[in-house]
Image (cartoon, coloured by chain):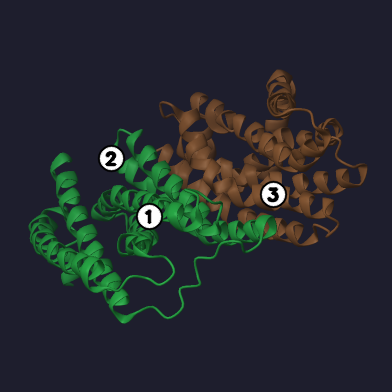
Amino acid sequence: MLAAARCVVYRDLLLALRRRGDVAVALLFFVIVASLFPLGIGAEPNLLRSIAPGVIWVAALLSSMLSLGRLFAADYDDGTLEQMLLGAAPLGVVAAAKAFAHWLVAGLPLVAIAPLIALQYDLGAGLWGILALSLLVGTPVLSLLGAVGAALTLGLRGGGVLLSLLVLPLYVPVLIMGAGAVEMAAAGLGGGGQLLVLGAMLVLAAAFAPWAIAAALRISLE
Amino acid sequence: MKWFWYASPQTFYPLAGRIARWSALGAAVLAVCGLYIGFFVAPTDAQQGEAYRIIFIHVPAAWMSMFIYVVMAVWSALCLALNTRLSGMMAAALAPTGALFTFIALWTGSLWGKPTWGTYWVWDARLTSELILLFLYLGFIALRASIDDPRRADRAAAVLAVVGVVNVPIIYYSVQWWNTLHQGASVSLTRAPSMAATMLTGMLVMALAFWLYAIAVSMVRVRCIIRERGE
């Protein structure tokens, strides 16, 4: 069972490595969106400092969502997904592995690059750690919830726009807690509480989302 | 069991018609009574003046918006667990009514907010979570609309509704926490000290009227869906 999961993760990472452009585009999107806000709002340092956590989190959320469309699409088109469904490994495990691979490709680079954006927004160096930590705990939840939406909209017309309509309302708690942790830390109150709630959401999502993804995939492949 | 007898769309169709007729009648009578109590019998509020009278629409609509989502999720869970045709149809029939009530709650809330709070919109925890609930309803309807095969649409939307209903409390509490973190308790909906008995009666009668309306409309809609699918 774990071997199957390892196989799926390895395969997806290999595919992402062969198509490095896709990963780079999502990262670039994150940077560009975050850079647009000062241009629209004005470069007043105090203002930027106060909106930085929210902007960075919204940009991360959109960037992670952007790559969801590709999560199952290629496997669906060439029939791999059907083989996975027929295979011996439980579909829930395969789904969890795919979501994990998506996070490694679309979530983890955001964690690494977020301090750079924080620098642009003049966020104090002491807050980089908590920003990265909140993204580290929060982005896997985005991948897991997003995978449910991706599985539901598989092969539908207007899938991309529909996917955002389904998934974005579900992302709200993660956004609130993720940005809240950084804001609390900036106010000198420590963001530990929010981080713990984020962790609880991750545990919940990791436990239940794979079943929802598997159910959605079965429906989409009927 | 009689219950499963009615689980078939064919046998349910005439029953739905009867329920719809009586519920519509009840809803009309109760709405007239409730509005009469609300506008003519209930006293003017000492603090809010006449503006408070919108609660006779607003509060029942807000209750129904949340309640219908839960009912929809229960039908969806039944659809996934038992794979019955009628459950998916019921969930589909309830969604537009739920979205409508959510929209009415938001709309009347902002109309009430202008004279009372001085603004149409505040990022109050309840308003925000009601708005997100509207998005959840619209997502459910949009997902159904984009799938051509009705059976697949039923089950895909059912998964979404079940995932959504698990998220609703999480969304509500996180929004509440976010709200207290941002602006403190500048506005509170929960004060309403001791409400006059007539106001409460009016509100409960209106809630019953909305309830019966929701039943009537969803029964009519489920009949249309049964017809559409040629069951």
Compared with residue A149, is residue B127 higher up or lower down, i.e. above or below?
below
- The residue pinned by badge 2 equals B150
Q: Position of residue A155 (x, y in %)?
A: 44, 29
- The residue pinned by badge 3 equals A2
Identity, as a three-letter code, of the amino acid under mark 2: Pro
User: For the image shown, how many numbered marks are present on the structure?
Assistant: 3
Residue B152 located left or right of residue A133? left
Q: Are marks 1 and 2 on the same chain?
A: yes
Q: Chain of mark 2?
A: B
The numbered disc on residue B83 is none
Q: Position of residue B199 (x, y in %)?
A: 31, 74
The reply to whether discs 1 and 3 touch (Cβ–Cβ < 8 Å) is no
Q: Residue drawn 76% across and 53% down?
A: A181
Find numbered disc 1 in the image and state the secondary structure of the residue it sits on.
helix
Q: Residue drawn 42% across and 65% down?
A: B48
The reply to whether discs 1 and 2 touch (Cβ–Cβ < 8 Å) is no
Residue B231 located left or right of residue B39? left
- The residue pinned by badge 1 equals B105
- Chain painted in brown in the figure: A
Find numbered disc 2 in the image and state the secondary structure of the residue it sits on.
helix
